[in-house]
């Protein structure tokens, strides 16, 4: 799942030359979701299916919120659809 998100970010440079995101930026977002997200922390480690579902949802939301701030309006919907 995370590899698809990274390559989606990487392919944005084909749409506009200013859309270039580093691996470090990608990893910072993943780390923030996994370590500081209270929704994920509230789920016990004994329920891996629910935990995976919530992590996937939170990653999608965080990437969408973070990356869409730097995109043109017409490219925000495209990025969201490519994530889905």
Image (spheres, grey):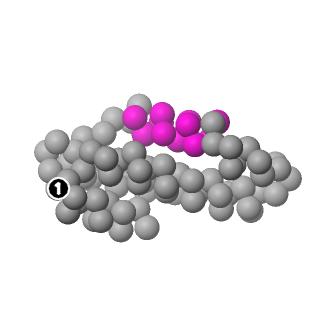
* Residue 51 on the magenta segment: no
**Residue 14 shows up from this direction:** no
Where's residue 74, x and y in %? 20, 63
Where's residue 19, x and y in %? 22, 45
**Residue 48 shows up from this direction:** yes
Q: Tell me the residue at 24%/41% (across/down).
A: 20
Where's residue 50, x and y in %? 74, 61
Camera-side residue of 39 and 14: 39
Q: Residue furthest right?
A: 46
Q: Tell me the residue at 22%/58% (across/down).
A: 73
* Residue 31 on the magenta segment: yes
Q: Tell me the residue at 20%/53% (across/down).
A: 72
Residue at image mark 1? 15
How many residues crowd mark 1 within 10 Å: few (<14), some (14–19), many (20+)?
few
Where's residue 34, x and y in %? 62, 41
Q: Which corner quadrant holds the C terminus?
A: bottom left
Question: Magenta region: which residues?
Answer: 25-35
Q: Is residue 30 left or right of residue 73?
A: right
Q: Tell me the residue at 72%/56% (across/down).
A: 51
Q: Is residue 21 left or right of residue 4?
A: left
């Amino acid at each position: 799942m995370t590899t698809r998100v990274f390559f989606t970010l990487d392919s944005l440079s084909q749409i506009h030359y200013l859309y270039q995101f580093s691996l470090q930026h990608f990893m910072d977002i993943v780390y923030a979701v996994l370590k500081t997200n209270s929704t994920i922390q509230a789920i016990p480690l004994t329920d891996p299916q629910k935990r995976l579902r919530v992590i996937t949802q939170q990653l999608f939301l965080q990437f969408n919120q973070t990356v869409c701030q730097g995109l043109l309006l017409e490219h925000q919907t495209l990025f969201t659809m490519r994530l889905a």
